[in-house]
Image (cartoon, helix red, strand yellow):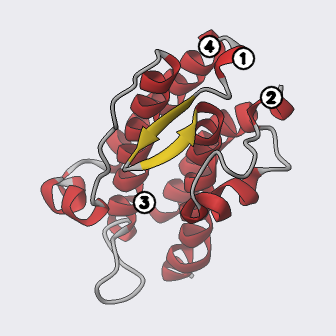
Amino acid sequence: MNELILPQEGEYVAFYKGYIAAVAEKDIMGLYLSQIEEVKEIFGQLGEEKSMLAYAPGKWTGKEVLGHMIDTDRIFAYRALCIARGEKGPLPGFDQDEYLAAAAFNDLPLGQLVRDFELSRNAITSMVRSLDPKLYTQMGNANGNPVSLRAILTMIPGHAHHHLRILQERYLSLIA
């Protein structure tokens, strides 16, 4: 199934190349679920108090990183659904910093954020399983750029992979 999901160049803009390359050799469907366990493990180690820390001035707290991951999953899932259903109109972009400023992730219990990530991933997995694979190459327009359904489905775990590496490398060092 993975070979059906992996997008070709031209199905996404260069900005997303790193996200797609990071997971290209992995089981995309499996990543949707295994990344839940990664989130639980990382935030289990950080805990409530340390998840309120940023690794440097001006950087997001651990909770804010997780909240951003949840927001992005939901936005990408919406884009995927729209493209799968044949939406012809352009789908809006979003400014991650403005979204973060409007959210109150630091005020939420860490357990709620972890559960929200898990719920989001389970919903995405269910949606993808319900899609006809013939739709994977269907194109849409998100943030003013052409994008295929399968590119978005690959960007979801690729984006999370990016942030999970940062959490492991920079945030877990806060508890060492």
First in residue order: circle 4 vs circle 2 = 2
The x, y position of residue 115, in whole percent, is: 41, 35
- Residue 126 seen by the camera: yes
- Residue 76 lies left or right of residue 148; in this view the side is left
The residue shown at (31%, 89%) is: 57
The residue shown at (59%, 31%) is: 149
The residue pinned by badge 1 equals 133
Number of other residues with Cα within 10 Å of mark 3, as a class: few under 14, some 14 to 19, many 20 or more: some
How far, Cα to Cα, is label 2 from label 1? 7 Å
How far, Cα to Cα, is label 1 from label 4? 6 Å
Position above or below: 30 against 62: above
Disc 2 to disc 1: CB gap under 8 Å:
yes
How far, Cα to Cα, is label 4 from label 3? 37 Å
Number of other residues with Cα within 10 Å of mark 1, as a class: few under 14, some 14 to 19, many 20 or more: some
Disc number for residue 131: 4
State the SS at label 2: helix
The residue pinned by badge 2 equals 4
- Residue 153 lies left or right of residue 118; in this view the side is right
Q: Label 2 is placed on what type of residue?
A: Leu
Disc 1 to disc 4: CB gap under 8 Å:
yes
